[in-house]
Amino acid sequence: NWYSAVPLDEIEWILDILYIKGEESAPIAVIEFLDFQCPYCKRQHDNKLLSELRDVEFPSKVRTAAAMFPLTGKWHEYSQIAAESAECAYIQWGLDTFYDHKTGLYANGIVPTMNVIRRVASNNGLDPDKMQACIDEWHAASAVLAQKNLGISLWVRGTPYSVILDTRSGAFKTLRGAVPIEVFMDEIQFLYKSVK
């Protein structure tokens, strides 16, 4: 939860492996590490917290990003495949489709079986067989692993977990769990004002 920094030469790589929305010139990136079987991630998604920060509160200062952080264990048996399906939506059909797929998965609860994934893909006008073929290859799993490793390097230990990153300085602050928008706003304002 304390402030730290990432080397400036790593910021471009970090942003390159995420699903970013907002103005490219916005200096603050709010990165949400999520798991599709996490009820608090679903709640944060349903509350539209990140889009509120990006589009309403700080439209020229904040861009937002999703990052896969599939957990393991008894209550997360479909987390990895759901994360891979989201990456496949992005690989094959682009950023908007990734976000449509994310919304579709959360709209179907927090048990994203392969049948649910195929149904969401079909409902979004995607080819479920292409989605399945993509999941069966290694590309999606590799991208998900890169995002999870990034999260681990930024002290992410559960979901939802947010990282507020100032791309000008590399300074960042982590927020664990589903926290109120006011907390995000305070941290964003602090980071934004800290670099002139």
Image (spheres, rainbow, N blue to C red):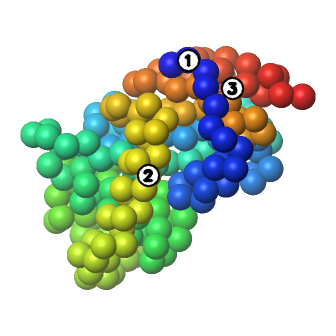
Q: Nearer the viewer, mark 3 or mark 2?
A: 2
Q: Nearer the viewer, residue 106 or 5?
A: 5
**Residue type pointed to by label 3:** Ile
Q: Is residue 76 left or right of residue 83?
A: left
User: Which of the marked residues, 2 or 1, is nearer the chain's N terminus?
Assistant: 1
Residue 127 seen:
yes
Q: CA distance from mark 3 to mark 1?
A: 14 Å
Q: Nearer the viewer, mark 3 or mark 1?
A: 1
Label 3 crowd bin: few (<14), some (14–19), many (20+), radius 10 Å: many
Q: Position of residue 36 (x, y in %)?
A: 30, 46
User: Which of the marked residues, 3 or 1, is nearer the chain's N terminus?
Assistant: 1
Q: Is residue 59 left or right of residue 12?
A: right
Instruction: Please report the residue visible at 40 percent of the width from the left and 24 percent of the height from the top.
Output: 177
User: Which of the marked residues, 3 or 2, is nearer the chain's N terminus?
Assistant: 2
Instruction: Please report the residue visible at 25 percent of the width from the left and 42 percent of the height from the top.
Output: 71
Q: Is residue 190 above or below residue 160?
A: above
Element on which disc 1 rests = loop
**Residue type pointed to by label 1:** Trp
Q: Position of residue 79 (x, y in %)?
A: 24, 50
Element on which disc 3 rests = helix
**Residue type pointed to by label 2:** Gln
Q: Is residue 143 left or right of residue 48?
A: left
Disc 1 designates what residue?
A: 2
Q: Position of residue 6 (x, y in %)?
A: 62, 37
Disc 3 designates what residue?
A: 188
Disc 2 designates what residue?
A: 147
Q: Quadrant of residue 160?
A: top left
Q: Is residue 47 above or below residue 180?
A: below
Label 1 crowd bin: few (<14), some (14–19), many (20+), radius 10 Å: few
Q: Nearer the viewer, residue 6 or 123?
A: 6
